[in-house]
Amino acid sequence: TVTVADARVTDGAPGLPTNVSFATAVVPLFTARGCVACHAGGGAGKDLGGLTLSGPASQVYKELIDERPGIRVNPGKPEASLILTMPSRESPPDGHPNVTFTGPRDPDYLRLLVWIREGAKNN
């Protein structure tokens, strides 16, 4: 097994991104973090969670926004969105089989959070 990591150490809290694009910043993180491998075709995430993250950005957006309005993505309470809570470390743990985001300072967690706070636009 080989693990490759790219890390950057900075002082203080991480800066929040702005103007987060769904197509170019959000969708690619699902592939980079391994979400698509499980949430596609006959994957466990597709079968157990009913969520498909493969396909074009328009289809992924529909899955997140239209299939379960206010649940997978909750613009009124962004931190309560399942897209953030399920793959995050929690005590007690939820039913998600792995920890994708180690905490609320994770850069991809923050990218998703800001996208939701900015209105969860299909941009």
Image (cartoon, rainbow, N blue to C red):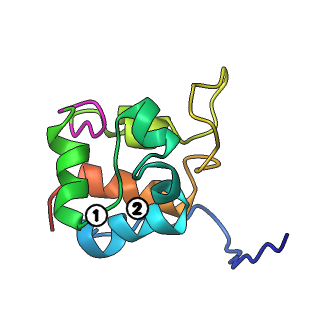
- Position in image of residue 54 (x %, y %): 35, 60
Q: In which quarter of the image is residue 51?
A: top left
**Where's residue 74, x and y in %?**
25, 36
Question: In the image, which residues are magenta?
Answer: 69-75
**Given the image, on which type of amino acid does mark 1 rest?**
Gly
Q: Which residue type carries mark 2?
A: Arg
Residue 44 is left or right of residue 79, and the answer is right
Residue at 57% across / 57% down in the picture?
106
Residue at the far top: name it: 92
Question: Which label sits in the foreground, 1 or 2?
Answer: 1
Q: In which quarter of the image is residue 53?
A: bottom left
Q: How far apart are marks 1 and 2 (CA)?
A: 20 Å
Residue position marked by numbered label 2 in the rendering? 111
Residue 119 drawn at (x, y percent)? 17, 51
Would you say 64 lies left or right of 36 here? Answer: left
Circle nearer the N terminus (1, 2)? 1
Q: Residue 55 carries which label?
A: 1
* Residue 81 within the segment the image draws in magenta: no
User: Where's residue 36, x and y in %?
Assistant: 45, 58
In the rendered image of this protein, does residue 120 appear above or below residue 75? Answer: below
Q: Main secondary structure of the magenta part?
A: loop
Q: In this view, does 25 lie above or below 93?
A: below
Q: Residue at x 49, y 61 (%)?
A: 108
